[in-house]
Amino acid sequence: MRQHAVLITVLFALGVTIVSVSIVFWEFFLLNKQHYIDHIFTKHATITQIFRQHQQKQHSQIMLEANLAVYNFVLEKDKEAIKTILNNAKVLKKKDFQSVNSSLTFSQGGFFTKKTVTDLTASMLEFNKKIYFYIKSPTSSVLILDEELKPYRYWSVAYSYMTILVIISFSFVLILQRLRPLIRLRKKIALYGDGNMNISFKTKGHDEIALISNELEATREKINIILESRTLFLRNLMHELKTPIAKGTIATQMLESQKQRDRFSSIFGRLESLVNEFALIEEVTSLGDKTDFKEYRLIDIIDGAIDMAMIDRNCVEVNVDASYKINANYRLYTTAIKNMIDNGIKYSTDSHVKILIKNEELCFESKGECIAHPLQYYIEPFTKDNPAKNSFGLGLYLVDSILKAHNQVLAHEYENGTNRFIFA
C-alpha cells in the first residue's frame, strides 16, 4: 500500500474529479432538458388559440387544418393512431387553465356581454421521436403533431461530457507518465542499498525529478569516494600494524626469560587477533555485492566453524539435518558460527554448546545465567559483560554485522536456565 501511495493518490484524485464532473453534467443535463421542454411548450398557446376559435366559430375541420398548417401543425385524424399515441406517449409537460370567451348578447333588457369560462388541458407528448400537443376541453379534444419540433437531443451534452472526460483522463495519463521516472529512481535506490555501488542515477532533463536524480548521482559519487578512501585507509592501517606485530612476535622468541616470552607472545597474539577481527569487520561493512554468496550445506559450514575455533568436538553438540542448505558467504558465515561457539563455551556453566534448527532458524543453546543487559547492548563494539574474560568485545558485534549482510538478525531467548541465541 505504501509503495504505491503516489499512484493511489493520483487515481483517487482522478476518481474524485470524474465523479464531480459527472454530477455537474448530470445536473446541467436535467436543467437544460427542462429548459428546452419549457421553451417548446410555449407553442401550446398558439394551438390553444386556434382550437378555441374553432370551437367558438364552429369552423369546419378543413378550416382547422388550414389554420394549423400555417404554423406547421398537423391534425391527427386517425382514431386508432390517436388512441395508441395517448396510451403510449411520454408526457413531457401538462398544464390546466381556463379559457374565457366574451360575446355580445341581446335580450329584453338590451345588449350585454356574456362571458363563458371553459376548462382546458394542454399536454405535450413525445412518441416515436415526434412532439404532439393534446388539447382537451369538456366537449372535445384534438391531437396535433408539430413537424418542426424534435425531442430533446442528448448527444450534444454527452459529446461535451465525453470530451471533458477524455481531456481529464489524458491529463492524468500525462501526470502518471511524468511520475514514471520516480519508479525507476526507487528501483535504482533499492539496488544501491543492496550494494550495487556502480548504479547510476544520472538523468537527462531539467524537471524536478531529473534534478533530484542528478543530485543523488553526485551524492553517490561522493559516498563511493569516501568508502574507497575508508577501505584503503583501513587496509593500509592493518597492513602497517601487522608488520610491527610480526616483528614483535619474532623478537619475543629472543627473550631469555620464559615468563616474559610467554607474556609478550600473549600480548602480540591478542593484537594480531584484534587486527584480524578488524579486517573481518571491514570486509563485512564494505561488502558491495553478493557474488560470493553460494549454496552450502549448513552442516559443512558448522564443521568449518568448529575447526576454526580449534576446540574439542565433544564440547559441541550438533543436531542439524545434513540436507539443510543456506545461501551464504562461506568464510563470513563460518566466522559468525565460530564466534557463537566461542561465546557459548566461554560463558556456559558446563563449557558445552548445542547447535540445532528450530522453526527453520539456526539456534545456539548453552546453560548459564541470563545475560544481564538487553541483546542490543552486547552487539555494540567493544562491549563486554565480564572484563575478566579474554575477549575484545567484538564477537557479537561481528556476528550481527555478518547476519545483516545475509538479511538476518541476531535474537536471544532465555528458558529454563538455557541461553538461546538465534539466527533469525
Image: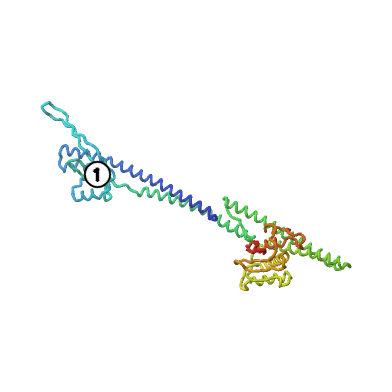
Q: Nearer the viewer, residue 177 or 336?
A: 336
* Color style of the picture: rainbow
Would you identify the image quadrant in which residue 43 lies?
top left
Q: Residue at x 62, y 70 (%)?
A: 295
Left-right relation of 58 to 373: left
Q: Residue at x 38, y 44 (%)?
A: 28
- Answer yes or no: is residue 386 visible: yes
Q: What secondary structure is marked by label 1?
A: strand
Q: Taking 94 as reference, is 81 above or below it?
A: below
Tell me if mark 1 has few (under 14), some (14-19) or many (20+) residues whose alpha carbon lies within 10 angstroms of its own: many
Report the quarter where the C terminus lies.
bottom right
Left-right relation of 158 to 254: left
Q: Residue 12's spot in the image, x, y percent?
A: 48, 51
Left-right relation of 186 to 346: left
Which amino acid is tagged 1? Answer: Phe
- Answer yes or no: is residue 410 visible: no
Q: Residue at x 42, y 47 (%)?
A: 21
The residue to which callout 1 is attached is 133
Q: Residue 302's spot in the image, x, y percent?
A: 67, 70
Q: Residue at x 72, y 58 (%)?
A: 381
Left-right relation of 62 to 325: left
Q: Nearer the viewer, residue 161 or 280?
A: 280
Q: Taking 73 as reference, is 363 above or below it?
A: below
- Total numbered circles: 1
Q: Residue 76's spot in the image, x, y percent?
A: 20, 47
Q: Residue 401's spot in the image, x, y percent?
A: 67, 61
Q: Nearer the viewer, residue 314 or 156?
A: 314
Q: Residue furthest front?
A: 416
Q: Residue furthest top?
A: 109
